[in-house]
Amino acid sequence: MLYDFVNETGYLGLAVRLKRLSEAMVHSGRQMYKELGEDIEPNWFLIFKLLKKYEQLSVTEMASKLHFSHPSVITLVGKMEKAGYLHSSVDKSDSRKKHFRLSEKAHENLPRFEKIWSAGAEGTKKLFPEGSNFMDLLELLEVQYSKQSFKDRTLNELNQ
């Protein structure tokens, strides 16, 4: 394996390593969809799955369920609506709010997409030794950072 300075930084480089891994996975996902002739983006699966489960949601509801920022969800649903995978309607009680649902095009393509996503999940699962608890550790990391931020943890260490 090639020398990697970021690895030398240990826990301090955790965010960089996670971001680097995420970017590599998204880039590879884009290449895969292109090779398969699919006109979707790697992170769209979240909205497809969310709206399959809940049928119709506002941007605020999606952001809350995904723990994403409002602008991030607006960008996602905007691209998906432009590609014809979502329909939106204005809320009758609040004209500033839009509700999104999967379009007919989305429903037609969903079985094929779900097959791809399932294969992706299985391929990723095989990266880890059987019985590995990586997903549990990742959840623990997310929970711990939701309780106390990197900033607060660092300041606590400085003040000890």
Image (spheres, helix red, strand yellow):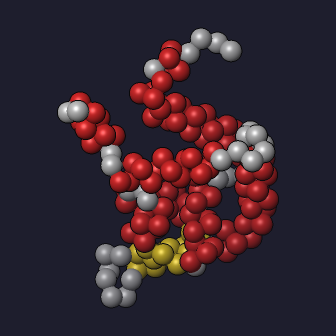
- Looking at the image, residue 95 sits to the left or right of residue 113; the answer is left
Between 156 and 138, the one lying in front of the other is 156
Q: Is residue 112 left or right of residue 95?
A: right
Q: Position of residue 75 (x, y in %)?
A: 44, 55
Is residue 122 among what the camera can see? yes
Q: Is residue 27 above or below residue 148?
A: above
**Residue 107, quarter of the rendered image:** bottom right
Extreme-front residue of the structure = 160
In this rendering, the answer to whether 124 lies above or below 96 is: above
Q: Is residue 67 above or below residue 5?
A: below
Place of residue 91 in the rendered image (x, y in percent of width and height, measured from the top left) = 39, 83
Residue 83 in percent (x, y) is at 59, 59
Residue at 25% from the left image edge and 38% from the top image edge: 156
On the image, the x and y values in percent for residue 143 come to: 45, 54
Going by the image, does 154 lie left or right of 22?
Answer: left
Give the quarter of the figure containing the C terminus: top left
Q: State the residue at coordinates (33%, 45%).
A: 149
Q: Which residue is located at x 52 percent, y 30 percent?
A: 17
Task: Determine if residue 59 is in view.
Answer: no
Nearer the observer, 146 or 83: 146
Residue at 33% in and 49% down: 148
Q: Residue furthest top?
A: 3
